[in-house]
Image: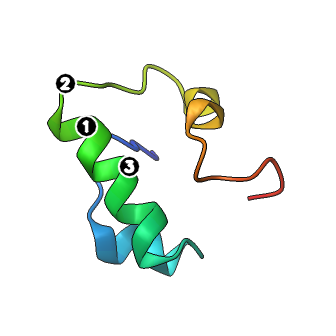
């Protein structure tokens, strides 16, 4: 099962995100943010709707 709260920068990059996008997600998580469902990733400005 895909859990965006637990994957690493390398895993995000394997999914097609850039290092900058991946780092932004991890920074969000480090600051206490959580993704309760996969659709919550749409809240991240660094990820386009297409991604």
Looking at the rendering, which quadrant does residue 38 occupy?
top right
Q: Nearer the viewer, residue 2 or 29?
A: 29
Q: How many marks?
A: 3
Q: Is residue 24 left or right of residue 6?
A: right
For disc 1, the marked residue is 29
Whether residue 2 is situated above or below residue 28 in the rendered picture: below
**What is the x, y in percent for residue 36?**
43, 19
Direction right: furthest residue: 50
Looking at the rendering, which quadrant does residue 20 occupy?
bottom left
Q: Residue at x 39, y 42 (%)?
A: 3
The reply to whether callout 3 and callout 2 are in contact (CB within 8 Å) is no
Distance in Å between CA atoms under marks 2 and 1: 5 Å
**What is the x, y in percent for residue 14?**
48, 80
Binning the other alpha carbons within 10 Å of mark 2 as few (below 14), some (14 to 19) or many (20 upward) gives: few
**What is the x, y in percent for residue 29?**
25, 37
| Residue 6 visible | no
Whether residue 22 is situated above or below residue 40 in the rendered picture: below
Q: Is residue 45 left or right of residue 35?
A: right
Helix or strand or loop: what does disc 3 sit on?
helix
For disc 2, the marked residue is 32
Whether residue 41 is situated above or below residue 26 in the rendered picture: above
For disc 3, the marked residue is 25
The reply to whether callout 3 and callout 1 are in contact (CB within 8 Å) is yes
């Amino acid at each position: 099962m895909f859990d965006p709260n637990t994957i690493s920068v390398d895993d995000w990059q394997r999914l097609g995100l850039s290092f900058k996008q991946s780092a932004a997600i991890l920074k969000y998580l480090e600051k206490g943010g959580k993704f309760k469902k996969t659709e919550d990733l749409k809240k991240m400005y660094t990820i386009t709707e297409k991604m």
